[in-house]
Image (cartoon, grey):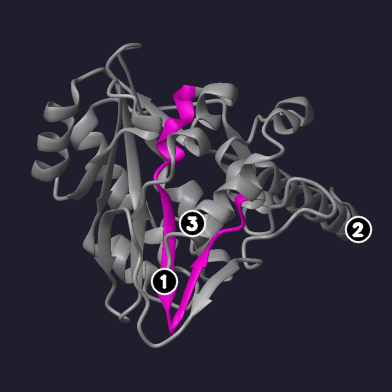
Amino acid sequence: MTSPFKKLFLALTLTLFAAASLQAKTVSAYFSAPYHDAKTVKSKLGHAGLHVLATYHPAGKSYLNVILYTSGTLKKLAAKPKRGFAAVGRVLVNSKAKTVLATNPEYWLHAFLQKEYRSGSGAAVTRALGKALGKLSPTKDALSSSDLAKYHFMIGMPYYDEMITLKSGKKLSVKNRVFTLTLPNGSKVIGVRMPRSVESFVSKIGEDKALVLPYLVLIEHGKAMILHPKYYLAISYPRLSMGQFMRISSTPGQIESAIKRLVK
C-alpha cells in the first residue's frame, strides 16, 4: 500500500513537472502557409472576416508584399493603454521566393498585451487565418511563453513598456502614412513609410521577416509613441544572433530618427 508520504511526494513531483512543462512551452512568432499571390491572399483574408488595412512593399521592393489586417477581436483587445500595437496582424507574400508568412496572433498578443494577455486570446484570429491561408505551419522562430511578456534581448536592453515618446501635443500629425486605424478607446495606430536606406536592414538579416515593416506609431492621450526599435527588432527576430544584431547596430537609432521627422 502506498503511504500518505509517498502519495504526497508523487503529487508534488507531478505538479512540478507540469509547471516546468508549461513554462518551457514555446510559441512560434510566425506561421508559414501555402503560396498564393498577394491579390488572392487579400481576398481570402477578407472572406475569412479579417479587415485588410493596406499592402506595403518594404524598402520599395515590389516582390515583398506585406498585407496588414485587423479584426473586431484584435481591436477590442488592443483598446487599452499602451496596447494598441496588438491590433494589427501581418502576412508577407514574397512573390520571388513564392512563400507566405503570417504573424502568429498568440505570440504577438502575448508580447504586446503583457499582463493583460489571456491564453487563447488569439484563437478566433488564428482560425480565420487558417481559413484564409490554408495549413498554418509554425516556424522555428519562437520564444517560451514565460519569456514573451517580460522579453528583452539581453541585460541592458529595453522591455516592451520602455517605449519612445516622439512628440506630445493636442494636435499631432504623421507624414508618410501607410494606414491609420482608430481603436474603440480613441487611440490611433499608424503605419509609416521610412526611407529605403533605413528599411534596407531587412535585407541584411532576412527578407523572410520583412513583414516587420511598416513600423507602427501609437497616438494615445496626446503622445506619439513607438516601440523601442531594439525591443521590436529582437522580438521580431527571436533567432537573431549577437553577430547579426551587431550588423544592424545603427538601425535602431536610424529608425527613431526617421520616424521623429515624420511626426509633427
The residue to which callout 3 is attached is: 259
Location of residue 174 in the rendering, given as x and y in whole percent from the top left corner:
35, 65
Tell me which residue sits at (32%, 53%) in the image: 176
Q: Which residues are magenta?
A: 207-229
Using the rendered view, name the quadrant where residue 245 is placed.
top right
Q: As rendered, which of 57 and 108 lies closer to the eye?
A: 57
State how many labels appear: 3
Label annotation for residue 116:
none
The residue to which callout 2 is attached is: 5
Q: Is residue 71 visible?
A: yes
Q: Is residue 105 above or below residue 166?
A: above
Frontmost of labels 1 and 3 is 1
Residue 261 within the segment the image draws in magenta:
no
Q: Is residue 222 above or below residue 192?
A: below
Residue 223 within the segment the image draws in magenta:
yes
Tell me which residue sits at (37%, 52%) in the image: 192
